[in-house]
Amino acid sequence: MAYINENYNKLKAGYLFPEIARRVTAFNQANPEAAKRLIRCGIGDVTEALPSAVLKAMHAAVDELGQRESFRGYGPEQGYEFLRQAIAQNDFKSRGIEVEADEIFISDGSKCDTGNILDIFGAGNRIAITDPVYPVYVDTNVMAGNTGDADESGAYAGLHYLKCTPENGFVADIPSEPVDLVYLCYPNNPTGAVATRAQLEAWVQYALKHKALLLYDAAYEAYIKDPSLPRSIFEIPGARDCAIEFRSFSKNGGFTGVRCAFVVIPKGLKGKTRDGGTQAIHPLWSRRHSTKFNGTSYIVQRGAEAVYSPEGKAEVAALIEHYMGNAALLVEACRKVGLPVFGGQNAPYVWVGTPGGLSSWEMFDRMLNQANVVITPGSGFGRAGEGYFRISAFNSRANVEEVCRRIAAL
Ligand code: MLT
């Protein structure tokens, strides 16, 4: 009999979103009439159709695969050059940010990338995460054996929690002690907070001083409207020596079902070895990709490339405007009923304080049962999320307007 990875036994309950789905299914079965008016603002899943530029590119790619002359089998594991070049040019160089095409690794999603990245780090790192946090960062560290057990509050021994509250604007304060790996996500999931340039500069200074590595998740950068806010950690001087960035086509191009993302690893970025030496990280991730991944589908990469065409850019801008219009309505509706509201300005998530001291899950139940609206309980993102809930702005305008009416009527 094979030994199992017993670290999995340390995980608390189910992963947040399947747990919500389970509760919603139970509600729907018990309340078939109410189920018909259910509106889902839980998981941040896009609802609008793919940009037509993307569709055209994917159709053309399918046709190419249908001809022997233009057929393609396995592609480069790190991604096709056409997409890596398009990303380097449009997301970085055109904004004056130094990132080369061969520092970009195409993948099938940021969830996978932020989890898989632990493959290239050794045991014994001091790991800092924000609280609340995207649960994948925590659970993958638990699975990898980088934590001890969780206490009754759900906090894992061995993790450094950086509490995010209204007092710090939900942007993590610099830790008082040195750590080795820090997960940061801006625009933030779940709070919708965005770090300012000064705040990211402080993080980069901290990382350089303590030789820490920042794992910077910028999956929602397309939602930044305020031009003074950084969209990439590599806008900050020094970041090339201390940061890895994760980006995704899920929330800009609407690829949550199509699947395409990328990781940026500067070639000069280093980690340390047990014998006191240092070693470049870029070749490790490249090796990992070659061994464990056969590349994102050609069709999908052609679709992602089309996000950067003039037509694609205009369509993506319209999608973002649509979702941010939803966010503005949700912010307004919550404010009108006197709830404390955060986020929703430069992010597609609205983070709301629960009324009357309700717990996050009590609020989830109330929204489900009384308003027939699915939200995400803040406590699912960590202890500091207790007393909050998250509303996703990914929906049709009609649904969001209806959610606003139901919030007013609660
Ligand atoms: C969320 O709702 O937090 C996101 O959809 C999760 C994800 O992108 O994996």
Image (cartoon, grey):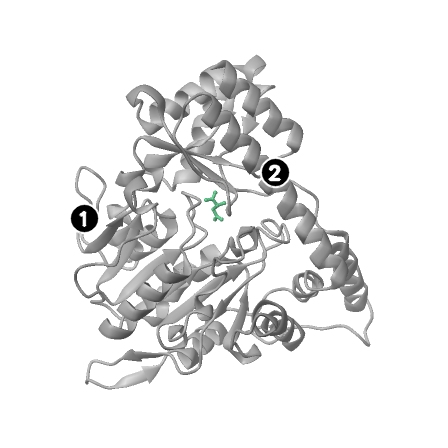
Q: Quadrant of residue 361?
A: top left
Contact (Cβ within 8 Å) of mark 1 with mark 2: no
Q: Is residue 5 left or right of residue 79?
A: left
Sequence-first disc among 1 and 2: 1
Q: Is mark 1 within 8 Å of ligand 1?
A: no
Give the answer, above or below, for where 131 lies relative to 27.
below
Q: Is residue 16 left or right of residue 84?
A: left
Q: Residue at x 61, y 38 (%)?
A: 325
Q: Position of residue 401 (x, y in %)?
A: 61, 26
Residue 278: tell me if it is visible.
yes
Q: Position of residue 160 (x, y in %)?
A: 21, 55
Which residue is more in the foreground, 282 or 32?
282
Q: Residue at x 40, y 59 (%)?
A: 115
Dot 2 falls on a residue whose secondary structure is: helix
Characterize the local packing of mark 2: few (<14), some (14-19) or many (20 or more) Cα atoms within 10 angstroms. some
Q: Quadrant of residue 198?
A: bottom left
Characterize the local packing of mark 1: few (<14), some (14-19) or many (20 or more) Cα atoms within 10 angstroms. some
Dot 1 falls on a residue whose secondary structure is: loop
Tag 2: residue type? Gly
C-alpha distance separating marks 1 and 2: 42 Å
**Mark 2 lies on residue:** 325
Q: Quadrant of residue 127?
A: bottom left
Which residue is more in the foreground, 294 or 106?
106
Q: Is residue 216 left or right of residue 101?
A: left
Q: Residue at x 35, y 73 (%)?
A: 242
Give the answer, above or below, for where 20 lies relative to 180.
above
Q: Position of residue 36 (x, y in %)?
A: 61, 19
Q: Position of residue 46 (x, y in %)?
A: 60, 43
Tag 1: residue type? Asp
Q: Quadrant of the N terminus?
A: bottom left
**Mark 1 lies on residue:** 149
Which residue is more in the foreground, 236 or 102?
236
